[in-house]
Amino acid sequence: MDAEKPVPKDDEVLIKNHATEISPADIAFRSGKPFIARFFTGLLRPKGIPGDVLAGEIEAVGKNVSKFRKGDRVFGSRGRRPALRPSISVWQRRTPWSRCLQN
């Protein structure tokens, strides 16, 4: 996939994506079943891209980032935004779903 590498904002980190996942919920989302789900995901075909969980390594940090540093291995979720990109710029907060595997 060719995509322009994002530049992290002051309070964001840039993550080199090593892995993502497609969950059973993503598969159901793509299949449009049950039919009523199509009212939220698209009547004829899905409007979004599945895969919101990622694992990777921090490539760069914004100037206001204090909780992470370059080289940290991390995993987390982007909510309902797709994580299927080579590099992703995300907000720096730590939550139960966003963890640093090494410091």
Image: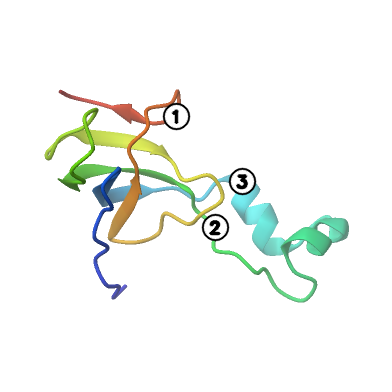
Residue 49: horizontal and vertical position, in percent? 54, 63
Secondary structure at numbered mark 3: helix
Q: In this view, does 18 lie to the left or right of 51?
A: left
Can you say which quadrant of the picture contains the C terminus? top left
Residue drawn at the location 81% of the way across and 56% of the way down: 37
Label 2: few (<14), some (14–19) or many (≥20) C-alpha neighbours in 10 Å? many
Question: What mark, if any, has residue 83 been given in the picture?
Answer: none
In the picture shown, does residue 50 fall above or below 68? Answer: below
How far is disc 2 from disc 1 in space, using C-alphas? 18 Å
Ranked by sequence position, the earlier of labels 1 and 3 is 3
Identity, as a three-letter code, of the amino acid under mark 3: Pro
Secondary structure at numbered mark 2: loop
Identity, as a three-letter code, of the amino acid under mark 1: Trp
Dot 2 and dot 3 residues touching (CB under 8 Å): no
Q: Name the residue under label 1.
A: 97
Q: Mark 2 points at which residue?
A: 50
Residue drawn at the location 80% of the way across and 72% of the way down: 43
Identity, as a three-letter code, of the amino acid under mark 2: Pro
Ranked by sequence position, the earlier of labels 2 and 3 is 3
| Front-lying residue, 95 or 31 | 95
| Front-lying residue, 94 or 74 | 94
Q: Which of marks 2 and 1 is in front?
A: 1
Residue 7: horizontal and vertical position, in percent? 24, 60
Q: Name the residue under label 3.
A: 24
Residue drawn at the location 61% of the way across and 46% of the way down: 24
Residue 98: horizontal and vertical position, in percent? 38, 31
Residue drawn at the location 32% of the way across and 37% of the way down: 92
Label 1: few (<14), some (14–19) or many (≥20) C-alpha neighbours in 10 Å? few
Q: Is residue 5 left or right of residue 50?
A: left
Q: How many labels does the image show?
A: 3
Dot 2 and dot 1 residues touching (CB under 8 Å): no
